[in-house]
Each structure stands twice: as structure tokens, then as C-alpha cells.
Image (cartoon, helix red, strand yellow):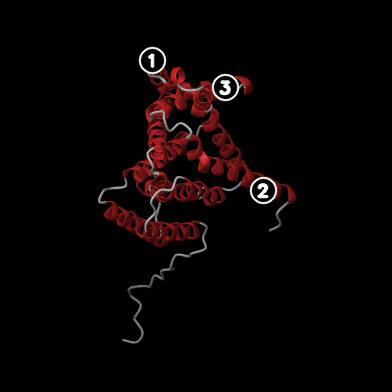
């Protein structure tokens, strides 16, 4: 089958968009760390509010009112969108908390585990069938999580919360099938009043960051909206122009950058047990990815007629 030049160009553009999106997501710890002195819950409130401002401006400037109003007219879809808002808020809070309390490595583990959680949800929610290789990948990844759990003496809840909240968020987005801009407007809309009330309460009592930090940090707080929206828009463009499998490969860019930053920039403790645990997860991801693209074939079962006599007996 011949692949046209236009098709190759479009695919290449999709890969570029996707690479930039995941690279920005991977570098986010550097941005959150600039606000280390600000409590994670306050950073979250600013991220929600300023994200709502940014995506609302995009809606106004691009005139995407039809899609927005159509989503609001469907009550069932609207409830699911609002649920998305609370789930992604929990994911954002956990990630910001992880970065500003020295758990960047554990956060990266969460996003390595995420694709496998997506598979688990696909089996349990969408009744998708799991091949032997995919099942093996899940077992190997679970072994890696168990190893780090035993080493910690506690469950790596940051990694698990990040993995399950982002997978649940993606699952609901798959169900409602809404364009990213309209979706983010409505998702942030439901939690923006809470976030704004919290910000104003802090400022009124004199302990808010906007009234107490230097001007550069005020701009950093306001910039959380752009930092949130930009990779989302790049991801949306990428998924339009390349295959879902390719975007699946590219998604490992972000946690890999997180891991490198955690070890070499934030100087977090990375033991031999960490390495062993991550190796299990990496092996699981390789098996899962190869099985997903059809490189690892499932064994073919040959059915025999019970009435047919067996040879050699």
C-alpha cells in the first residue's frame, strides 16, 4: 500500500505536536517548583481559575459556542463533564503536592503505570478482551509496584492516585467524546467558583500568595492557566494528525523527563529498589506496547473435533 506525501506530512506534524505536548508535561515540575513557597492547595486553586480564564478566551476568540452549548444541553453528558472536573482537580493537586514535597520520582511512576490502568479499565468497564501478553504486562507491573511498596513500608499512594485519576479522566472523556477546549471550559467551570472563593478568602485574611509574594511569582501563578492549556491544545492537534498508537508511544516522554528531573535536578533519593521496581514497570510497558501494536502475537489455539480420534494413542 502506497503512503501519500500528504499523509506522511500530516503524520509527521502529529508526531511533532505530540512530542511538544508530552515534553511540556514532562517539564512541569520545574514550573511548579518555582512556587515551592506556596501551598499546593493554593497553587491548585490558581491553576483552576486561570485555566478557566484562558480556555474561556479561546472559546470567545474562536467562536466555538455551538459545541459548548450542545454539551450543556445534554444533562447526562454535563454531569459526567462535572465529574471530570473534580477528578482532574484531584490529579492536579496530587501532582503539585508531589513536586513540592519531593516525590517527583514517585509521580513519574504514576504516569508509567497509567497506560496499564487504562487497559484494566478497558477490560472492566468497556468489556474489552485482554490478551495473554497484556495480562502478563499487568502482572509484571503489579510486581514492580509491590516491590516499591515493600521497600517504602507503605503504599505508593501518590503514584497510584495519579495513575487511577488520569486513567478515570480519560475513560470518562472517551465516553462523552467532547472536544478538548469545550471540555476544559466546563470541567474548570464547575470547580472555578470554589477555587475563586478560596483565593479571595486567603487574600482577604492577608495570607494569600498574590498579596504577599514578589511580582514575578504573581505572574507565575497567573501563568498556570497557559501552562495547563498549551500542552492540552498541542495534544489535541497531535491526536488529530497521527495514530492513537503513536501517541501511546509518545506518552512515555513525560514520565521519563519527570524521572530524570527527580534524580538529577531535585536530587531525590533513588535506590537500587527503585531501579528494580522501575525495571519491572518498563518491561511491562514494552510488552504491553509491543502486544498493542501487534508485534507480539497471541498463540493460536487449534480447535479439534471431539469425535476425531487422537493420533498416537
Q: Which residue is mark 2?
A: 12
The disc at residue 66 is: 3
**Residue 66 image point, x, y percent:** 57, 22
Question: Which of the two residues, 38 or 11, is positioned nearer the viewer here?
Answer: 38
Mark yes or no: residue 19 visible. Answer: yes
The image quarter in which residue 281 lies: bottom left
Tell me which numbered mark, 2 or 3, is placed earlier along the sequence. 2
Q: Secondary structure at mark 2?
A: helix
Label of residue 206 in the image: 1
Q: How many numbered marks does the figure carry?
A: 3
Instruction: Measuring from the top left, give residue 134's x and y in whole percent.
Output: 41, 58
Q: Position of residue 130 (x, y in %)?
A: 39, 56
Q: Is residue 181 above or below residue 7?
A: above
Observer-nearest of 36 and 121: 36
Whether 102 is drawn above or below 217: the answer is below
Image quadrant where residue 90 sits: top left
Q: Is residue 51 above or below residue 123?
A: above
Image vertical order of residue 302 relative to residue 230, above or below: below
The furthest residue to the bottom = 312
Left or right: 19, with 139 as reference point: right
**Viewport quadrant of the C terminus:** bottom left
Confirm or deny contact between disc 1 and disc 2 (CB under 8 A).
no
Amino acid at each position: 500500500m502506497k503512503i501519500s506525501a500528504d499523509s506522511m506530512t500530516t503524520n509527521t506534524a502529529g508526531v511533532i505536536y505530540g512530542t511538544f505536548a508530552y515534553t511540556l508535561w514532562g517539564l512541569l515540575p520545574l514550573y511548579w517548583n518555582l512556587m515551592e513557597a506556596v501551598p499546593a492547595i493554593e497553587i491548585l486553586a490558581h491553576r483552576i481559575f486561570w485555566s478557566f480564564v484562558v480556555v474561556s478566551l479561546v472559546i470567545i476568540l474562536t467562536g466555538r459556542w455551538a459545541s459548548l452549548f450542545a454539551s450543556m444541553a445534554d444533562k447526562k453528558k454535563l454531569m459526567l463533564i462535572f465529574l471530570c472536573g473534580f477528578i482532574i482537580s484531584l490529579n492536579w493537586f496530587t501532582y503539585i503536592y508531589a513536586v513540592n514535597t519531593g516525590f517527583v520520582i514517585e509521580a513519574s511512576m504514576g504516569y508509567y503505570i497509567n497506560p496499564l490502568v487504562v487497559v484494566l479499565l478497558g477490560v472492566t468497564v468497556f468489556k474489552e478482551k485482554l490478551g495473554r501478553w497484556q495480562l502478563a504486562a499487568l502482572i509484571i507491573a503489579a510486581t514492580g509496584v509491590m516491590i516499591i511498596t515493600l521497600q517504602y513500608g507503605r503504599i505508593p499512594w501518590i503514584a497510584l492516585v495519579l495513575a487511577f485519576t488520569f486513567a478515570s479522566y480519560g475513560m470518562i472523556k472517551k465516553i462523552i467524546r467532547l472536544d478538548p477546549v469545550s471540555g476544559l471550559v466546563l470541567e474548570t467551570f464547575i470547580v472555578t467558583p470554589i477555587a475563586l472563593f478560596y483565593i479571595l478568602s486567603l487574600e482577604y485574611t492577608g495570607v494569600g500568595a498574590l498579596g504577599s509574594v514578589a511580582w514575578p511569582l504573581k505572574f507565575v501563578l497567573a501563568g498556570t492557566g497557559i501552562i495547563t492549556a498549551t500542552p492540552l491544545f498541542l495534544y489535541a492537534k497531535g491526536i488529530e494528525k497521527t495514530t492513537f498508537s503513536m501517541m501511546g508511544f509518545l506518552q512515555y516522554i513525560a514520565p521519563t523527563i519527570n524521572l530524570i528531573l527527580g534524580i538529577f535536578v531535585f536530587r531525590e533519593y533513588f535506590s537500587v529498589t527503585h531501579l528494580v521496581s522501575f525495571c519491572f514497570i518498563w518491561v511491562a510497558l514494552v510488552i504491553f506496547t509491543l502486544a498493542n501494536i501487534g508485534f507480539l502475537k497471541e498463540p493460536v489455539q487449534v480447535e479439534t473435533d471431539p469425535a476425531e480420534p487422537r493420533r498416537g494413542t
